[in-house]
Image (cartoon, rainbow, N blue to C red):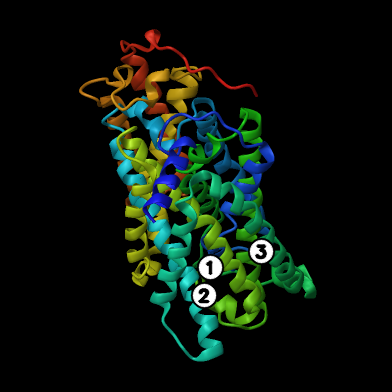
Amino acid sequence: MLRAYRRLDAHLSAGADDGTPVTGDLSGRRVFAIWLAANLVVTTMLTGTLFVPSVSLSSALWLILAGTVVGALVLVAVGNVGTRTGLPTMALTRASFGVRGSRIPVAANIAVLMGWSWVQAMLAGVTVNYVVQQQTGYSNPALFSVLCEVIVVSLAIFGHAGIAKVEPILAVVILAIMAYLFLDMFGDGFARLNALPRDPDGLSGLGIFDIVVATAVSWTVLSADINRFARTERGGVIGSGLGYIASTVAAMTLGATAIAWLLANGEDAPPFDPTVIVAEFGVPLAGVVFFSVMATNSMAVYGMVTSLVNAEPGRIRFLPAALGLGVVSIAGSAWLALLDKFTSFLTAIGIVFIPVFAIIVVDFYVLRRGRYAASLAEAGARTYWYRGGWNPVAVAVWVVGVAFSSVITYVWVSPVGATVPTFLVSAGLYWVASATVRGRSTAAEEPVAARSS
């Protein structure tokens, strides 16, 4: 057992899962397959159930497409920084927040991904429990949630190489089942599903658009984690962009269509409840839920571990970190009460991370013109030391961005949602504030050689 542990630990270290910069070897097709499987997930599908009958099914589909494309721009932009530098998402925050200041988004990211991991394991567990209960009468959703998370952690501890091999297979399985479900639901025609009476107290069109964009932001925490393994910038950008858009549109469309189908057939269809849909569509949809969680949650656990490892490069190894965080994720997956707070959880992710990604995009593409110093991979990089390891400009803008987003979300509710306004305000503030204190040592930086695209 100890020998197997040492061999796996050495393999992960050699594959750069220990936090060192990588030279990517994944083709654009493989990157596409990974991102395709990533968001074909039950949480994305159930998010689609929130949109109908607030708006018509056709309007919901257009809003899903538009919001996904806009959100994907941020995801792809951050992911491409990972391809250029070979570093994961949270390691990139050292350049803008400072070596020590980056611990703020790193800590938040671990907490967010842990929450994602729990929620998805719970949804899979609840779904498996429903199927088992219908067949045998036995019910223990907490147990099935834990068992689902055990499988996920087992996949994640093999690092990015294991994920790259498993995700394409799961994507094919999930898409095949989804195709069957779409054919079944559209068998009576689209017009009947599109003619449902609107809910006057439901979400507005702009509110739906904002939720869809926020979904992309929630995935951006993993964008550089995966895209740093892309062989070329072109492959990473096209693969992740098309993969994310295709998977998100497909999953949300399935959720919106399923809820419309149930309502059109006179069924009681509360949103964000997988058992209601599984009860109608049976084992095929339960299969989508289960396999999607395996595909997505392995990436969430991998992202958690990568964030922790890169918080202290060279000091924390991937395998022990994966096992430690894996134990916590398995234990927490039994906390089923979190499911009732999912929409609040998604909102919190946006509030915390939209300013972070706005700062990264402006810092890399505008202020530093697409170049970071090679020393960014080092834990104590003096180039990004700022003041005692903290960049007061980035930290201040992040605080203001979080406050601004909170206000237009909970106090003076923005008619256009919070995601896009918060991104633009945070990006503008960081640009202006940084331009006034350009006395830092950017001119002395050695650029990382960009890969061929």
Q: Nearer the viewer, residue 137 or 420?
A: 137
State the separation of the CA atoms marked 1 and 2.
Answer: 31 Å
Q: Classify mark 3: helix, strand or loop.
A: helix
Q: Residues within 10 Å of mark 3 (few under 14, many from 20)?
A: many
Q: Name the residue under label 3.
A: 57
Q: Classify mark 2: helix, strand or loop.
A: helix
Indicate the position of residue 301 as horizontal and vertical percent values. 43, 52
Q: Is residue 399 visible?
A: no
Circles 3 and 2: CB atoms closer than 8 Å? no
Q: Which of 359 and 333 is in front in this view?
A: 333
State the separation of the CA atoms marked 3 and 2.
Answer: 25 Å
Residue at position x 43%, y 64% from top? 150
Label disc, if present, on residue 127 of the rendered structure? 2
Indicate the position of residue 388 as horizontal and vertical percent values. 20, 23
Residue at position x 58%, y 64% from top? 291
For marks 3 and 2 on the same chain, the one whose residue lies earlier in the sequence: 3
Query: Which quadrant of the structure image shows residue 443?
Result: top left
Q: Mark 1 points at which residue?
A: 200
Amino acid type, mark 2: Thr
